[in-house]
Amino acid sequence: MTIELATLDGKAPQPSRAMESPLSIRGLTVSYGQKPAVFSVDMAVEAGKMTAIIGPNGAGKSTLLKAALGIVKPLSGQIQVFGAPLERQRARIAYVPQRASIDWDFPTRVIDVVLMGLYRQLGLLGRVRNTHRLRAKHCLERVGMADFAERQIGQLSGGQQQRVFLARALAQDADLYLLDEPFAGVDAATEKAIINVLKSLRAEGKTVVVVHHDLATVRDYFDNVFLINTSKVAEGPVDTCFTAETLQATYGGRLATAQVDQLAAALV
Amino acid sequence: MIRDALLLQLGYNASLVAVGATLLGIAAGATGTFLFLRKRALVSDAISHATLPGVCLAFILMVALGGDGRNLLGLLTGSAISAWIGLLCLGWLVRHTRLAEDAAIGAVLSVFFGFGIVLLTVIQTMGSGRQAGLESFLLGSTAGMLWSDAIVITLGGALTLALLLVLRRPMTLVAFDPEYAAARGLPVHRIDLAMMGLVMAVTVVGLKIVGLILIVALLIIPAVTARFWTERSDRVVLLAGLLGGMSGYAGAAISASAPNLPTGPIIVLVSFVLFAASLLLAPGRGVLAAVLRHLRFQKRVHLRQGLLALAQGHLIYEPLTLRLLKRAGLARPDGVATDQGRARAAKALRDERRWQMIRSDQDYEAAAALYDGLRDIETVLTPDQITELDRAIGGPKGVVA
């Protein structure tokens, strides 16, 4: 497998850096109670690529992501981000959580949510300046939501809310983007907007990891897949790892044979 | 009398109380907002009830050491310690057992309060000269408020506000999206503890004025009142502080204006009046505004349906529809359309036909999504697009659109 050096920003390539996986996980086990949600998983995300984490409901996809971010505590396992411990690399990771976990009646406007992405620049007492606002506006433009900046977030549709969350992640200007089901229950326009932004991030040399549920779009959207059902099933390029066999191994009886055949046919 | 009170002309004690209550109201309103935004309003009730055993034990200890049991700073320190223990118990119950937070709050609140009442009874039997008046901590008592008490409240309130200023961003982030906050590396648990610590500080400082039973009102009511008026969290905080301060000031003044009016409960009632007024009158989120919005919407629906019925020559049975059409000069009392009514009706029908066209056309997907039966098509499509639609539909039948 070759790793391309991303130099689109004009900076000199840094071979030592580029060789390091943006996210590498070893022997990760996370458990709620006595039943492991994720068991002994190894993962090495390829830099500058878009990777989909795929698996059935309750397979530990979101848990894997949350453990990688230190939101849930693992029972065992090591997590390295760009070759260093997670805590030292926080500023380089952006996270887009699931929409369902939010109270949308919270008194906050779209622009305020995006400004939360600038938390580190603002600090505890720093004032929100025009440069910050312009930056936030620019991020909203990238997801096609600039006209909604002053709206209360509850007034948006589900897809629009998802795009605002993506804008907040963009404001962080990170190197690694982790998204939890960004395409779940969104309209076609939103799906298009989100995938375009993710592809432009990849073009900038950023790494994107997405928990994804729609098997039909995997091939169009992603370079790599990571198939998981509590433990890892397969990991690698879509062409070689997103096959009828690996899908069957991941979903077992949960995916009808007809569906598998259909997907496999689409893969040829 | 109230005017004198409001102008701080009822003497030294009343002025002291008014200033103290105002500062307490500001601090409590602003602090409580974060609790409200974090959806943990009732935790403050557990905290406040958990102060009682600490007050009593501090009194017993100070007397046992030969001092004056009524030293306010000593009592407040005791109350803070036991409130903190109550908070830790609550946190432990929620994190390490299957108890939900509401049940844990109930358990901690009642046990600590029960224990405190037992201690209070013990103290009352301790020696007749030692009537400490500790029961005033239950509902507050401002009759004998001292200059030193006012100083304690002022310093406590100012310190709380300063800490709020520093912690406002992390606390807001944690309240809105705790997972994202954790992903950014914020110590969510410690930020929550800090918020609880601030609530505890306000509670302890407020024991003297409103007492432990009613302090929860001062923490929560200003926040929910402020929420009616704004959609921005920073403004909710400021407004809640303002409303809390106003309640404290007005409540203290009113209670000073007549004998035997308890300060704490009056402050709570004043803040309730502000709450009730906001609930009814606030634009946007208020009850009255919601009713008016609904009525206006209903009117639009009926007018539209009436016009479509006129256009298709249907009889209108709905009295409200008929009344609205008549009032707008679109129909005669017998339900027959006027000239203007016929024109508007034809236009409505044509618009409906246009909507049908664009809703079955993939190219108009975005525009079609806006269909709700009421929206004017001119706000969605350009004149050119409409002309093109009309060409597809066929020439106007008698009425120019």
Image (cartoon, helix red, strand yellow):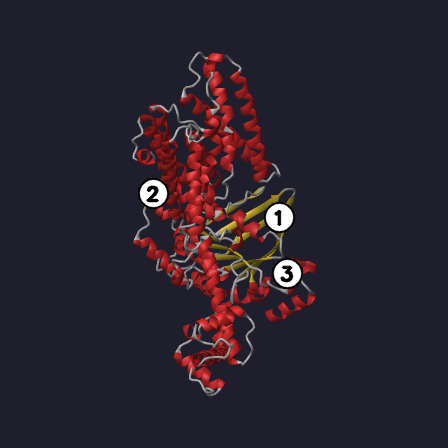
Q: Which residue is mark 1?
A: A37
Label 2 to label 3, Cα distance in Å?
51 Å
Q: Are marks 1 and 2 in contact (CB under 8 Å)?
A: no
Query: Label 3 belongs to which residue?
Result: A246
Q: Earlier in the sequence, mark 1 or mark 2?
A: 1
Q: Tag 3: Cα neighbours inside 10 Å, few (<14), some, or many (≥20)?
A: some
Residue B158 lies in what quarter of the image?
A: top left
- Per the model, the C-alpha gap separating discs 1 and 2 is 40 Å
Q: Amino acid at mark 2?
A: Leu
Determine the residue positioned at 42% across, 82% down: B401
Q: Nearer the viewer, residue B55 or A34?
A: B55
Task: Answer above or below: position of B13 versus A67.
Answer: above
For marks 2 and 3, give the one nearer the viewer.
Answer: 2
Of the two numbered discs 3 and 1 on the same chain, state the one appearing first in sequence.
Answer: 1
In the picture, measured across the screen, residue A254 lies left or right of residue B244, that is right
Pick the residue in front: B133 or B175. B133
**What residue is drawn where x is 45% and y is 34%?**
B265
Hey, what amino acid is under mark 1?
A: Ala
Is label 1 or label 2 in front?
2
* Numbered circle sitting on residue B81: none
Q: Which mark is residue A125?
A: 2
Q: Position of residue A131 (x, y in %)?
A: 31, 54
The answer to whether one can see residue B371 in this image is no
Mark 3 vs mark 1, CA separation in Å: 20 Å
Tag 2 subunit: A
In terms of image quadrants, where is residue A30?
top right
Residue type, mark 3 in image: Thr
**Depicted B216 relative to depicted A224: above or below:** above
Q: Secondary structure at mark 1?
A: strand
